[in-house]
Image (cartoon, rainbow, N blue to C red):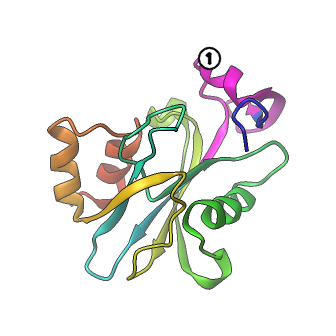
Amino acid sequence: MMQDLEILDIVDENDCVIGQKKRSEIYSQGLCNFRVVNAFVVNSLGQLWIPRRSAQKQIFPLCLDVSMGGHVESGETYEDALQRELKEELNLDLNMVNTQFLDYLTPHEYQVSAFMKVYEIRLDCEPDYNKNDFIESFWLSPSDLIKWLNKGEPAKSDLLKLVQMFYAN
């Protein structure tokens, strides 16, 4: 969906909906009181499948990203958004993959970009990802990914924090 047309719920500090705004307005105003879902694809070797965003992305173009991420659109639940984004970005059916809920994070408590639920998907093959969203991908151990990011590899703002939180030993 076009970013200018996408309407997201605005939430209070308790994640209760208090209004709606266009996605473009949320970003231009630098708000963090909206909802997102993120998921990491992890293989049996413990490697993370990390894609690089396409150059056409309006935010973080050509940056490394979580395996799947997306906005919770107005009226959706986190789980609705997870199901929709998995299909759109990775061509995966939520009911056909081994998915585990990792944690619920809030901007004021964890300094992340939005209210988010983070999931893990166990998969031993590369997802059939949407070539409009991503241009390449890597299977990386969490420690190698952290090294890349610490050396300055461009990445979406929450990626390092989430990998350190869930996968750094």
Quadrant of the rendered structure where residue 151 is? Answer: top left
State left or right for residue 35 relative to residue 158: right
The residue where tag 1 is placed is 28
117 shown above or below 18: below
Q: Which residues are magenta?
A: 10-37
Residue positioned 61% across, 65% down in the render: 86
114 shown above or below 121: above
Quadrant of the rendered structure where residue 54 is? Answer: top left
Q: Is residue 72 magenta?
A: no
State left or right for residue 94 relative to residue 60: right
Q: Quadrant of the C terminus?
A: bottom left
Quadrant of the rendered structure where residue 140 is? Answer: bottom left
The percent position of residue 16, horizontal first and vertical second, equals: 78, 38
Mark 1 burial class by Cα count in 10 Å: few <14, some 14-19, many 20+: few
Q: Is residue 25 magenta?
A: yes
100 shown above or below 64: below
Residue positioned 47% across, 73% down in the render: 127
**Which secondary structure, mark 1?**
helix
Residue positioned 70% across, 56% down in the render: 81
The percent position of residue 144, horizontal first and vertical second, equals: 17, 57
Residue positioned 76% across, 27% down in the render: 22
The mark total stands at 1
The percent position of residue 118, horizontal first and vertical second, equals: 52, 56
